[in-house]
Image (cartoon, rainbow, N blue to C red):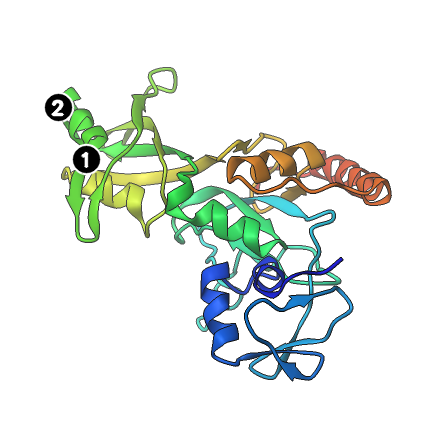
Amino acid sequence: MSEKLQKVLATAGLGSRRELEKWISAGRVSVNGSVAKLGDRAEPEDRILVDGRPIKIVTDDNPRVLMYSKPEGEVCTTSDPDGRPTVFDRLPRLGRGRWIAIGRLDINTSGLLLFTNHGELANRLMHPSYEVTREYMARIHGEVDEAMIRRLTEGVMLEDGVARFQSVKAQHARGADEEGGSRNRWFRVILAEGRTREVRRLWESQDVEVNRLKRISYGPIELPSIVRRADFIELDPKQVVSLFKAVNLRPPKFSEKNVHRDMRERKEKKLRARGNPWK
């Protein structure tokens, strides 16, 4: 079944449809040896080149999404010139397409990272217009009062514009802990965009320090305790569909063969994970 060329390229993870329309208009894309133009369509067996390089086509059938529990110390790049470990090092290899990280976490932040081979899904989940919520646990060093929380939820000016948390809740059940004679408190925070270091910068704007930060959910997906640090599991079809619906994408129709394969792989992964200690 043919699809609009810009959708095919977006699904392969090359960028947004609007950006890819510009690539097509600029003559950077060819299909089966002919320079493409806006309005062209492509099928899975077509040979597509972008800037002379072949592109592997990813279909909408059975898109894959992984959840990964990132430890501190890993960077969110495919390779690092300084030789530091990356979040891609432990992921399974794909026969077609590539893994795309949905958002980033800085080297000192742990928790939930999602990866997919479906570019359009990744683009929408990261785009601020869809307001996909992210939830974090933050340990704060410094005095936090109601006036500060009110400022953080109403909005504060950062160097790249006004930012705010949708909610800030003290985690009294976890209590305050003492480290080096300093009082630290845990807070659960939610925001609906993913600017660089936004959680840390919001707190730092109030002259307090974030000394631990962990992402615990992204949209409808929460990080379960079964996923150990530096480990991953694959989302089941129902979870994948929930992500598509969260960003107004038509949910995929999973083939029975691939659903059974994915369920078997996830079951094996969970059994292995139960035997692994926290790293």
Viewport quadrant of the N terminus: bottom right
Residues 228 and 248: in front is 248
- Amino acid type, label 2: Ala
Residue at the top extreme of this rendering: 173
Residue at image point 50% right, 62% down:
15
Residue at image point 71% right, 60% down:
93
Q: Secondary structure at mark 2?
A: helix
Q: In the figure, 25 relative to 211: above or below?
A: below
- Amino acid type, label 1: Gly
Q: Quadrant of residue 12?
A: bottom right
Residue at image point 60% right, 84% down:
52
**Residue 122 spot, x, y in % from top left:** 53, 51
* Residue bearing mark 2: 147
Q: Secondary structure at mark 1?
A: loop
Q: In the figure, 53 relative to 58: above or below?
A: below
* Residue bearing mark 1: 155
Alpha-carbon span between mark 2 and mark 1: 12 Å
Instruction: Specify few, some or many for label 2: CA neighbours under 10 Å numbering under 14, 14-19, or 20 or more.
Output: few
Residue at image point 37% right, 39% down:
213
Visible residue check, residue 80: no
Of callouts 2 and 1, the N-terminal one: 2
